[in-house]
C-alpha cells in the first residue's frame, strides 16, 4: 500500500473539519443555517430600490450574491421615469470605498470587482418586455443551469418579473431537458407582480414544477406610507433624527447616497402629526425580498408561514404564498397580486384611516421586527467607518437541544440557549415567547423563566389534534445599537 505523508497544517485542518462535522451532525437542524443563501436581485431602479440597494450591499456578506440585474416594471422602463441604465454604478463605486472597512467586520464581504462582474442590464425597453435576450437574462440563465451548485437560488423581483421570465423562456427553448433541474433549485420572492409576465408566461410554462413563490404586499409597511402604518413604538426608528444619527451623517460614502425623504409628492396622504420631514426614512418597499434571506435564526426560509424580518405568508394556490389577510371570508384573486388587487394596497387606498385594527394585524408580520432590523441596519452603517472594537455585532444564539422537538399534551419541555455568546462580550438578555402566528395551536402557552437562558414550557393538556407550537428564543445585547438574533424551536406533537 502506498503511503502518503501529511503535513502538520493539513493534519490540523482535517482534525478541525472532523470536529466541526461531529458538532454539526450532533445538531443537524442548527447546522442548516450555516450555509449561505444564494440570491439574484432584479430591480427597476425606483427611488425606493435605490434605498434598498444601500441596505442590500451592507448585507452582501450574508449571501452568495449571484447577480444584480436591472429590469423594468409597470412603473419604470426606458423613457418612463427611468433612473438610467447605469443607476447602480454610484452605489457599487461607494461600496468599493467602504469595502476595506467592511472587511474588518467580516472577511466574507464580496469584493467590489466581483459585484461589478455580476451586475447586468436586463429587459428594460418596455413594461413586461421579454422578447429580447439581454445580458441580464443570460446571466440568470447561466447561474440556473450551472450544475456545480445545486443549492436553492432566491430570485428576487424588486420590479417586474420580465427579465426573469426571459431567462426561463431561454432555458425552455434551448435546454428543455433542464427545466425540472432548474425549477428544483428556484425560489421566487416578488414585490408585487409589477408586470404581467408571471401570469402570462411563468405560471403557465413553469407552474407544473411547483416552484416556491412568495408575492409580497406587506412591504407597504416600510414603503412610502410607512408613517400611516408603523405602530407608535416603532416609528421613531424611521424619523429624521434617527436616520441622520444612524445612517445619513458620518457613515461613509455608501450611506451618504441613501435617498432620504426630500419633500414633495411623498407628502400626499400623510396622517396628522406625521413624523415625515426632510431627512427622514423615505421608502424601502423592496427590502423585504432580501430581509427574508438574512439568516437571523427565525427559519423563515424553511417555510414562508414561519415568518421573519421579510414578513409572513400563507399558501394560497399551488406553491404560491401571499400575505395573510385578517378576514375570515376574504377570497384571494385568481390572477395578479399587485396594485389593483393586493389587500394592503386596497385598504390604504380605499379604507384608511378606518378599521385600523385590521391594518395593524395585516402589517404586523413585518412591523413587529421593525426596531430590530433598523438597529441592525444602523450597526452595518457603523461597520462602514468604525473598527471592529468600536462597532457592535449581533449575538450568536445557540441551543443545547434540537430545533424541532417532540411533545405530548401535558408534557414538560426544557428549553436552553446554553452556548449563546456575544462577539463583543456585551451583556445578553433572553426572551422566550410563543409565536401564535406560526403555530397551529392557538391557545395559551405558559413559559416559566421566559427571561432566562434556560426556560421550561408546559405543553397544554387540552389538545386533541396534531399540533405545532413555535417558540422563539430572542436574544438581545446591550450594545449600541442594540442587536437581536433568534432561534425558532418547533414543538410537534399529537394526542
Image: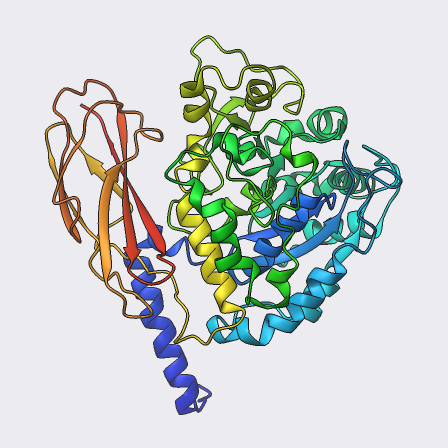
**Residue 158 location (% of width, % of height):** 66, 41
Residue 146 visible, this orientation: no
Find residue 265 and report its image quarter: top right
Q: Is residue 164 left or right of residue 306?
A: right
- Image quarter in which the N terminus is found: bottom left
- Image quarter in which the C terminus is found: top left
Snapshot colouring = rainbow
Find residue 376 and report its image quarter: bottom left
The image shows residue 282, relative to residue 399, as above or below, that is: above
Q: Residue furthest top?
A: 329
**Residue 461 location (% of width, % of height):** 12, 24
The image shows residue 41, relative to residue 326, as above or below, that is: below
The residue positioned 85% from the left and 37% from the top of the image is 80
The residue positioned 62% from the left and 36% from the top of the image is 190
The image shows residue 452, relative to residue 113, as above or below, that is: above
Near-viewer residue (54 or 468): 54
**Residue 391 location (% of width, % of height):** 41, 69
Q: Is residue 444 left or right of residue 279?
A: left
Residue 312 visible, this orientation: yes
Q: Is residue 77 left or right of residue 432?
A: right
Near-viewer residue (225 or 99): 225
Q: Residue furthest front?
A: 273
The image shows residue 328, relative to residue 61, as above or below, that is: above
The residue positioned 19% from the left and 34% from the top of the image is 407
**Residue 420 location (% of width, % of height):** 25, 60
Near-viewer residue (365 or 253): 253
Q: How many marks?
A: 0
The residue positioned 40% from the left and 20% from the top of the image is 357
Amino acid at each position: 500500500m502506498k503511503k502518503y505523508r501529511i503535513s502538520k497544517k493539513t493534519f490540523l485542518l482535517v482534525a478541525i473539519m472532523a470536529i466541526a462535522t461531529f458538532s454539526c451532525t450532533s445538531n443537524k437542524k442548527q447546522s442548516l443555517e450555516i450555509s449561505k443563501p444564494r440570491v439574484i436581485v432584479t430591480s427597476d431602479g425606483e427611488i425606493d430600490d435605490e434605498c434598498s440597494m444601500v441596505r442590500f450591499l451592507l448585507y452582501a456578506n450574508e449571501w452568495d450574491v449571484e447577480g444584480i440585474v436591472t429590469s423594468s416594471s409597470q412603473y419604470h422602463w426606458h423613457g418612463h421615469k427611468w433612473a438610467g441604465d447605469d443607476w447602480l454604478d454610484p452605489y457599487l463605486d461607494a461600496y468599493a470605498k467602504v469595502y476595506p472597512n467592511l472587511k474588518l467586520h467580516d472577511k466574507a464581504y464580496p469584493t467590489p470587482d466581483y459585484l461589478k462582474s455580476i451586475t447586468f442590464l436586463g429587459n428594460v425597453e418596455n413594461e413586461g418586455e421579454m422578447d429580447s435576450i439581454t445580458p441580464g437574462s443570460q446571466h440568470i440563465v447561466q447561474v440556473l443551469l450551472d450544475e456545480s451548485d445545486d443549492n436553492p437560488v432566491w430570485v428576487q423581483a424588486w420590479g417586474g418579473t420580465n427579465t426573469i421570465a426571459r431567462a426561463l423562456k431561454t432555458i425552455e427553448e434551448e435546454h428543455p431537458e433542464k427545466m425540472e433541474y432548474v425549477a428544483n433549485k428556484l425560489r421566487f420572492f416578488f414585490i408585487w407582480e409589477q408586470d404581467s409576465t408571471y401570469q402570462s408566461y411563468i405560471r403557465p410554462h413553469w407552474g407544473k414544477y411547483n416552484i416556491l413563490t412568495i408575492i409580497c404586499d406587506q412591504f407597504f409597511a416600510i414603503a412610502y406610507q410607512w408613517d400611516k402604518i408603523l405602530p407608535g413604538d416603532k416609528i421613531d426608528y424611521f424619523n429624521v433624527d434617527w436616520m441622520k444619527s444612524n445612517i445619513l451623517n458620518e457613515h461613509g460614502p455608501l450611506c451618504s447616497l441613501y435617498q432620504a425623504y426630500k419633500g414633495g409628492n411623498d407628502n400626499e396622504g400623510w396622517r396628522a402629526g406625521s413624523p415625515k420631514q426632510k431627512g427622514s426614512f423615505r421608502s424601502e418597499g423592496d427590502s423585504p425580498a432580501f430581509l427574508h434571506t438574512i439568516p437571523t435564526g427565525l427559519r423563515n426560509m424553511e417555510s414562508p408561514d414561519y415568518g421573519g424580518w421579510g414578513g409572513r405568508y400563507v399558501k394560497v394556490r399551488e406553491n404560491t404564498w401571499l400575505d395573510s389577510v385578517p378576514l375570515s371570508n376574504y377570497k384571494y384573486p385568481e390572477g395578479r397580486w399587485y396594485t389593483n388587487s393586493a389587500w394592503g394596497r386596497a385598504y390604504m387606498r380605499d379604507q384608511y384611516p378606518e378599521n385600523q385594527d385590521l391594518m395593524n394585524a395585516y402589517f404586523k408580520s413585518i412591523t413587529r421586527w421593525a426596531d430590530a432590523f433598523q438597529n441592525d441596519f444602523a450597526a452595518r452603517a457603523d461597520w462602514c467607518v468604525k473598527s471592529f472594537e468600536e462597532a457592535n455585532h449581533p449575538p450568536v444564539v445557540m441551543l443545547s437541544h434540537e430545533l424541532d422537538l417532540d411533545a405530548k399534551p401535558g408534557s414538560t419541555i426544557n428549553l436552553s440557549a446554553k452556548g449563546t455568546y456575544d462577539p463583543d462580550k456585551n451583556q445578553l438578555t433572553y426572551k422566550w415567547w410563543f409565536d401564535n402566528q406560526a403555530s397551529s395551536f392557538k391557545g395559551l402557552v405558559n413559559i416559566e423563566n421566559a427571561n432566562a437562558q434556560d426556560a421550561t414550557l408546559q405543553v397544554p393538556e387540552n389538545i386533541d389534534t396534531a399540533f405545532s407550537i413555535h417558540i422563539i428564543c430572542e436574544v438581545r445585547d446591550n450594545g449600541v445599537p442594540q442587536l437581536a438574533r433568534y432561534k425558532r424551536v418547533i414543538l410537534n406533537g399529537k394526542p
